[in-house]
């Protein structure tokens, strides 16, 4: 291999590395954004669950509220 071939190969490798670094940074940013979105969705779900339980209480009575079965 000549010096020119080695330099061309080195330039190609440096270019690939630069693109890979950029891709890794982009993917990392996207993952961080998705994590934030998931947290917001989880918090919204918790809030909706709380609001739903306040609006429509369960039709099932607790044991202390349940009348005893009839004795025949």
Image: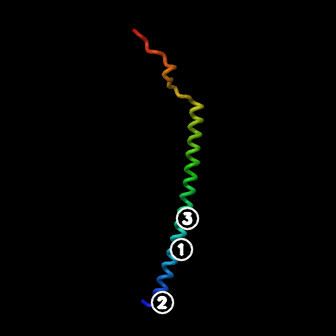
Please determine whether, in this image, residue 25 is positioned above or below residue 12.
above
Q: Earlier in the sequence, mark 3 or mark 1?
A: 1
Q: Give the class, few, some or many, for how many residues have Cα within 10 Å of label 2's Cα (few <14, many ≥20).
A: few
Q: Earlier in the sequence, mark 1 or mark 2?
A: 2
Please determine whether, in this image, residue 68 is positioned above or below residue 42.
above
Marks 2 and 3, how far apart at CA: 33 Å
Q: Earlier in the sequence, mark 2 or mark 3?
A: 2
- Label count reads 3
Residue at 59% across, 31% down:
55
Q: Give the class, few, some or many, for how many residues have Cα within 10 Å of label 1's Cα (few <14, many ≥20).
A: few
Please determine whether, in this image, residue 40 is positioned above or below residue 55.
below
Q: Give the class, few, some or many, for how many residues have Cα within 10 Å of label 3's Cα (few <14, many ≥20).
A: few
Marks 1 and 2, how far apart at CA: 21 Å
* Marks 2 and 3 close (CB-CB < 8 Å): no
Quadrant of residue 53 within the rendered picture: top right
Q: What's the colour scheme?
A: rainbow
Residue identified by numbered label 2: 4
Tell me the tag on residue 26. 3
* Marks 1 and 2 close (CB-CB < 8 Å): no
Residue identified by numbered label 1: 18
Residue at 52% across, 26% down:
59
């Amino acid at each position: 291999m000549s010096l020119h071939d080695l330099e061309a190969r080195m330039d190609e490798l440096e270019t690939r590395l630069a693109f890979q670094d950029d891709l890794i940074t982009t993917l990392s940013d996207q993952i961080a954004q998705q994590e934030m979105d998931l947290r917001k969705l989880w918090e919204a779900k918790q809030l909706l669950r709380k609001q739903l339980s306040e609006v429509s209480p369960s039709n099932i009575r607790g044991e202390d509220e349940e009348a005893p079965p009839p004795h025949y």
